[in-house]
Image (spheres, rainbow, N blue to C red):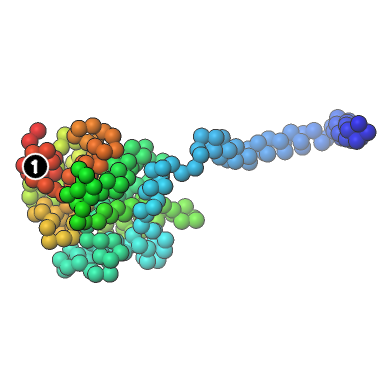
Amino acid sequence: MIILRAIGRFFARIGRWIKDTAWVQPLLIVGGIFAIIFSIPYLTKWVKSWFNTGDTAAQKYYSSKKVSLKNAEDAKSDVDGIFDYLEEYSKTNTVNPEYKKKYGDKFFLTLVQEDCSSCEERYEGFQTLEQKWGKDSFSEVSDETFKLHTIYVDSTNKDGDNLFEDVYERREVAAMFEETISYMSGEYVDHPYKDNSNDSSYVTNLENLTDREQISTPTTFLIDLTDKAPDWTSPHGVREVLFSFEGTNGSDGVAKARTLLNSWTNVESAENVFSKAYRK
């Protein structure tokens, strides 16, 4: 009790001093105002933390497949490498063995970003496909390897500069995407998915690929550099482009996985929306 009374007397003296010293009060008020102003970012972050328990399952999954943008400022990132791979293929029509070892010659390449609700909704399609790959009703790909690579288009460096923008401009990705639009929209050869799907925004989303800031996420490219690629595959190896890939018989993870599998296999079937044999 003696200690508590001593602490109480100490604060009481401070209170009387502030009360008796009038010039201190405006300084305390001004100081309090600035303290509140400067603490707002931290308060905001603290409040957000109430609702954010860490990375979502979707972000953890996409991050595990991430192609790094580290050293993009110096044109030495892995994302630079993957676009170099596709550019080299378009000019030589041969697969670089080093790049093939690193990325494969057939893979999904998906553009994602953080805080992307559509990315969250569609990750279970990839995850389910990977889990079921080569098994049961997914057995038709048992002799192939599932590959998914992701690029975070909102990645920034410590100065806040967008790293994907560097690659997009330097590697003339817009030109590659413009070529992709021509093939996917059926300008050069009929494209089954464009003709068969009921995605009314498909062509608009394709056209937005030539404007980095308008790119829809997730955007998924099926890259096929094998000799089995169909005739609508672009010179850079882009065989399909998907934005919203709900299943034809539902919208759960299995249905989305089946849509992704159908794009991968391109089996001629009345049930496969990526097939010329498809019938609505």
* Residue 14 placement, left or right of 266: right
Identify the residue shown where x is 13% and y is 40%: 273
Q: Depth check: 170 or 220 in front?
A: 220
The answer to which image quadrant residue 81 occupies is bottom left
- 276 relative to 117 in the view: left or right: left
Residue 113: percent from left, percent from top: 38, 46
Q: Nearer the viewer, residue 277 or 140?
A: 140
Picture coordinates of residue 225 (x, y %)?
18, 60
Q: Write down the quadrant of residue 201 in the picture.
A: top left
Which sits in the foreground, 149 or 48?
A: 149
How far across and down, in percent of the image, does residue 23 sit? Answer: 83, 35
Q: Residue at x 39, y 52 (%)?
A: 64
- At label 1, which amino acid type do we have? Ser
Q: Secondary structure at mark 1?
A: loop
Quarter holding the N terminus is: top right
Which residue occupies 55% across, 35% down?
A: 50
Q: Is residue 224 left or right of residue 62?
A: left
User: Is residue 182 at all visible to an observer of this figure?
Assistant: no
75 or 19: nearer the eye?
A: 75
Residue 149 is situated, as x and y percent measured from the top left of the image, at: 31, 54
Which residue is label 1 attached to? Answer: 269
Asked if residue 209 is positioned above or below residue 23 in the image, the reply reads below
Q: Residue at x 14, y 54 (%)?
A: 233
Q: Is residue 84 above or below residue 211?
A: below
Say which quadrant the C terminus sits in.
top left
Density class for disc 1 (Cα within 10 Å; few <14, some 14-19, many ≥20) is some
